[in-house]
Image (spheres, helix red, strand yellow):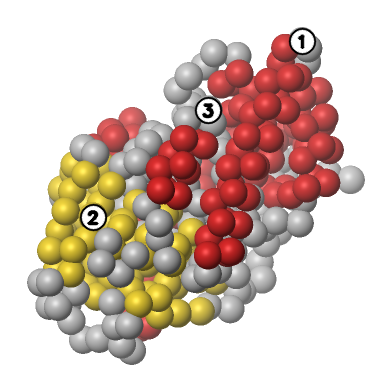
Amino acid sequence: MNKNFASQADLEEKVVTFSELSPQRAYAYTAEGDPNTGVVIGDDCVLVVDTQATPEMATDVIDKIRGVTDKPIKYVVLSHYHAVRVLGASAYGAEHVIASQDTRDLIVERGKEDMASEIGRFPRLFKGVDSIPGLTWPSMTFNGKMTLYLGSLEVQILQLGRGHTKGDTVVWLPQEKVLFAGDLVEYGATPYTGDAYLTDWPLTLDRIEALGAKAVVPGRGDALTTEESIADGINGTRAFVTDLYRSVEKETKAGSDLNAAYKSVYERLSKEYGHWVIFDHCMPFDVTRAFDESNGIRDPRVWTDERDRQMWLELEGAADS
């Protein structure tokens, strides 16, 4: 029996949680494994980390923010370029949209293609797709580190290394010890590695771990507020990307083609990670990227809606239900 393409069969609405991580300073908007949004409240304004996929979906985040503060939303920070993270930005009316220069470069290179690709994969996550005005463009970029002061609250916007993409950005509140990690860290959710640098990612996680956060908002999954859960999130992500790459590399060295590698690696990893959210969605993309990287293709190839479906047909036998 063929699997439904990507997440097209995932139509069940999720329960949203808006949790306080630091008193009146930091909040996490989470939804049972759907993409997360972070909220930082400074002395005189609000900063949002990742925006949801559409302006219509972002209105629920704004409603939650208005339940705790009436301060203006001045900043939006993009943890990376993926459409499901950035296309709701226009709803916030922010003065500044901040991203790494690498993220902006990726939007220039492949933003239009990524938008079409992700809308095709995730119909439920693009509720109100017609409300999207177009690509989200940063108004400010940085390389390595940028620091904002929201009054007395210091906000560090950091590139700690490549992993999920080459432009990955985290938001760190050093006074509060709260980290918004984007998709560099997942919790109970399968890392999507279709645009990843798999051999770099574990080192980037080491740098995240070294910050010593007391609370971490992963890209997907519950907010992590205990030492044990933070370790589980970081270590689980590290274990998955390491196991994925090593398993595919072993197949590559044995001369397996992509289809054979996929079947072998899927069977192996499903025993440990198959219960994680979006496992079946991610694995064809993940193995394909790992196969490329292990064959010396250092930079991820551009995913398009057409390429998605051709790949799915090759590995899963059908591109539609």
Residue 106: image x %, image y %?
34, 35
Which badge, 2 or 1, comes first in the chain's sequence? 2
Query: Quadrant location of residue 9?
Result: bottom right
Q: Are marks 2 and 1 in contact (CB under 8 Å)?
A: no
Quarter of the image for residue 12 reads bottom right
Observer-nearest residue: 229 or 40?
229
- Measure the C-alpha gap from mark 3 to mark 2: 25 Å
Disc number at residue 156? 2
Which residue is more in the foreground, 73 or 222? 222
Could you tell which of marks 3 and 2 lies nearer the N-terminus? 2
Callout 2 crowding tier (Cα within 10 Å): few <14, some 14–19, many ≥20: some
Amino acid type at image mark 3: Thr
- Mark 3 Cα shell of 10 Å, populated few (<14), some (14-19), many (≥20): some
Disc 2/disc 1 C-alpha distance (Å): 45 Å
* Marks 3 and 2 in Cβ contact (< 8 Å): no
Furthest residue toward bottom: 67
Residue positioned 77% across, 24% down in the render:
261
Secondary structure type for disc 1: loop
Q: Which of 127 and 28 lies nearest the eye of the viewer?
A: 28
Can you give x and y, in whole percent of width and height, for residue 215 in the image? 43, 67
Please name the amino acid that badge 1 sits on. Gly
Residue at figure coordinates x 40%, y 75% from the top left: 21
Tell me the quarter of the picture where residue 54 sits. Answer: bottom left
Q: Is residue 253 above or below residue 19?
A: above
- The single residue placed furthest to the right in the displayed view is 1
The image's mark for residue 255 is 1
Foreground mark, 2 or 1, reads: 2
Q: Which residue is mark 3?
A: 199
Residue 200, visible in the rendered structure: yes
- The N terminus lies in quadrant: top right
